[in-house]
Each structure stands twice: as C-alpha cells, then as structure tokens.
Image: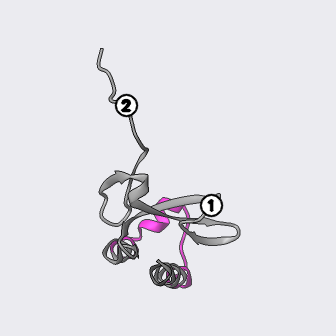
C-alpha cells in the first residue's frame, strides 16, 4: 500500500497560470453576496492567484481574466464591471504591502 507523504500545507492551483502551489504562496479572491474580496476572510466561491512580492501577480491576473477563469471558478457569469473591481482591489492590495 502506498503511503502519502505528510502534507505540510494545503496545495491549490492558480487560475491564471495553473501552477500548483502551497496556499501561502497564493492570494484568494472570493465572490459572495456581499461582493468581491481579495485575500480576506470570506465565505463564498474562491479563486486562487499567485502571490507576488507586492501582492497579486499581474501576469496571472491578466491570464485569468483573458481565459474567463473567474467565471469557471465561481461557477457564475462575471460582469465586465466586476473585472474592473478585481483589478482595482488587486492594485490597492499591491500598494498596501
């Protein structure tokens, strides 16, 4: 019988570049009835993007928007205005850190 190595941290996939990384190396963007939240405690459907030194990896965010990956991750249609909100929140997060 094959033994699983002990997992030190949960692994998630970036919806932009599809790379599997530990949860601490990613930023979670959630969508709920209250709106979109970037890397905060939130319920709702979540989508993961790679974390850069100053926040969200821009390349992964751009790739996820181009590929309409947020709609698949959230299992719902995403309005163009929501993409604008996501970009603004990600940029704000980069200025904070």
Residue 7 occupies which quadrant of the picture? top left
Nearer-N-terminus badge (1/2) = 2
Q: Is 4 above or below relative to 59?
A: above
Is 96 rendered above or below residue 16?
Answer: below
- Asked which secondary structure carries label 2, the reply is loop
Q: Please name the residue shown 41% across and 71% down the image.
A: 68
In this image, 27 relative to 52: left or right?
right
Q: Which residue is mark 1?
A: 41
Q: CA distance from mark 1 to mark 2?
A: 26 Å
Mark 2 — residue? Answer: 6
Q: Quadrant of the N terminus?
A: top left
Badges 1 and 2: C-beta atoms under 8 Å apart? Answer: no
Mark 2: few/some/many CA within 10 Å (<14, 14-19, 20+):
few
Across and down, in percent, residue 29 comes to: 52, 66
Q: Quadrant of residue 14?
A: bottom left
Q: Position of residue 41 (x, y in %)?
A: 62, 61
Q: Where, by quadrant of the figure, is residue 35 drawn? A: bottom right
Q: Tell which residue pokes out farthest to the right in this image.
A: 34
Residue under the point 53% across and 74% down: 78
- Helix, strand or loop at mark 1: loop
Q: Residue pushed farthest front?
A: 97
As for residue 28 lying within the magenta part, the answer is: no
> Which percent across, then down, holds residue 51?
38, 67
Name the chief secondary structure element in magenta: helix
Q: Nearer the viewer, residue 39 or 60?
A: 39
Specify the segment rendered in magenta. Answer: 63-84
Q: Position of residue 11 (x, y in %)?
A: 39, 47
Q: Indicate whether 61 appears above or below 84.
A: above
């Amino acid at each position: 019988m094959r033994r699983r190595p002990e997992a030190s941290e949960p692994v998630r996939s970036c919806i932009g570049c599809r790379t599997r990384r530990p949860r601490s190396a990613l930023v979670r963007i959630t969508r709920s009835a209250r709106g979109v939240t970037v890397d905060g405690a939130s319920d709702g459907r979540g989508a993961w993007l790679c974390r850069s030194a100053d926040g969200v990896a821009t390349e992964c965010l751009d790739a996820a928007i181009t590929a309409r990956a947020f709609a698949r991750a959230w299992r719902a249609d995403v309005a163009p205005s929501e993409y604008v909100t996501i970009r603004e929140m990600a940029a704000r997060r980069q200025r904070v850190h």
